[in-house]
Amino acid sequence: MAQYVSSSSLLLAALLLLVQQPYWATAVTYNVVNFGAKGEGRTDSTKAFLDAWAAACGSASPATIYVPPGRYLLRNAVFRGCNNHAITFRIDATLVAPSDYRVIGDAANWLAFQDVTGVSIIGGILDGQGTGLWACKRSGKNCPSGASTLGLTKSKNILVRGLTSLNSQMFHIVINGCDNVKLQGVRVSASGQSPNTDGIHVQLSSGVTIMDTQIKTGDDCVSVGPGASNLWIENVACGPGHGISIGSLAKDLEEEGVQNVTVKTVTFIGTQNGVRIKSWARPSNGFVKNVVFQHIRMVNVQNPIAIDQNYCPRNENCPGQISGVKISDVRYEDIHGTSASEVAVKFDCSSTNPCSGIKMQDVKLSYRNKAPQSLCANAGGMASGFVIPASCL
């Protein structure tokens, strides 16, 4: 005899099945190849990527833009914000900039995400092909300034994981005006002689985390500009490069301050600087406060610990002036290793706005198997624990 099943029972079973489905079951994937992208490295695939982005933006469900293996040539592209706040770029390929640096050289960014929310960029290699522009700049010719490889602007809730950036024309990754950005497992690689190729630059942003990252470049591994707050940098390898720098600050008279910055578990290898705070020697209402440098290893670093408030490259627009930036509450804890110069610690602070609240604890640096020197000007604070070189605070 046939078993009778009520319509209400069927409805209940259907609802239970829906509840048990994983949250991503309704997600949709857009393969850039289906939009005309070619993975042979010669055909301009910019429009295909932008069309895939438009399709993902039009989806009412979480969307993945998939880039399958290959080399995809892209001109500069801007991925603008939309109503879909759950878009993932999953890249199993290399995205390559035009070999002629003039094609994108006057753009601010090669690839830009602007006014977006909830975007994840997973994997992939971005090859900026910047060597031609570097050579142009070294020759003294009239060259474009160059494009940063990846720009994140006025965006929030962003994840970049497992991405590699190669040979950027200018900065590799720029985070500007953003909230809640996490970079994890990122790799940056460029020649130690490449000009202005900062690895990661953060400014006017809050809640940025940089973790498990390796940076080899010709400028700062990480540079921190005005308006950065609640910045966390952990487990980073830097070198070659110019170290991790807060600054340059005081470029403008009216400037937002930098605060609540933690840099921990970082190794510097053969870098020009280790942990540095620098400001131009000119008036500014900017400030730096509540900074922690902790668990740092220096290997043959030229200037392991530095505050430079008399920064004035080429003596242009600043000779004879004094920095208005106020630096306070900076802690250096558990920093050890080797200096490549006799002066391993240098605090050169503003004469009108002296540094205050500088604290050093358990610092042990050596120079050619002997104790290096420390130099202080207009710096106030204290040292505790084992501190070599002897504190000048």
Image (spheres, rainbow, N blue to C red):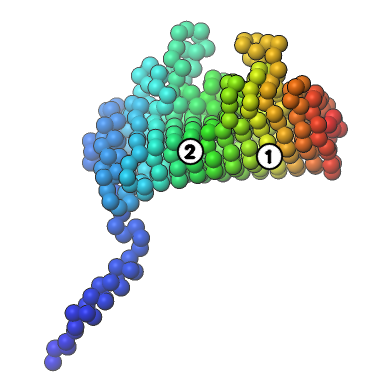
Give the amino acid type for the residue marked by disc 1 in the picture: Asn
Residue 123 appears in the rendering? no
**Badge 1 element:** strand
Q: Is residue 123 above or below residue 389?
A: below
Q: Residue at x 63, y 14 (%)?
A: 313
Which image quarter: residue 12?
Answer: bottom left
204, 171: nearer the viewer? 204
Horizontal and vertical percent position of residue 372: 82, 28
Give the amino acid type for the residue marked by disc 2 in the picture: Cys
Horizontal and vertical percent position of residue 256: 58, 30
Q: Residue at x 26, y 37 (%)?
A: 51
Label 2, label 1: how far apart the Cα atoms are: 20 Å
**How many residues crowd around disc 2 within 10 Å: few (fewer than 14), some, or many (20 or more)?**
many
Residue assigned mark 2:
178
Of labels 2 and 1, earlier in sequence is 2
> In the drawing, does residue 378 fall left or right of residue 14?
right
Please, which residue is most extreme toward the top here?
141
Horizontal and vertical percent position of residue 327: 70, 31
Q: Residue at x 49, y 41 (%)?
A: 179
Horizontal and vertical percent position of residue 200: 53, 33
> In the drawing, does residue 238 fall left or right of residue 46?
right
319, 120: nearer the viewer? 319
Residue assigned mark 1:
290
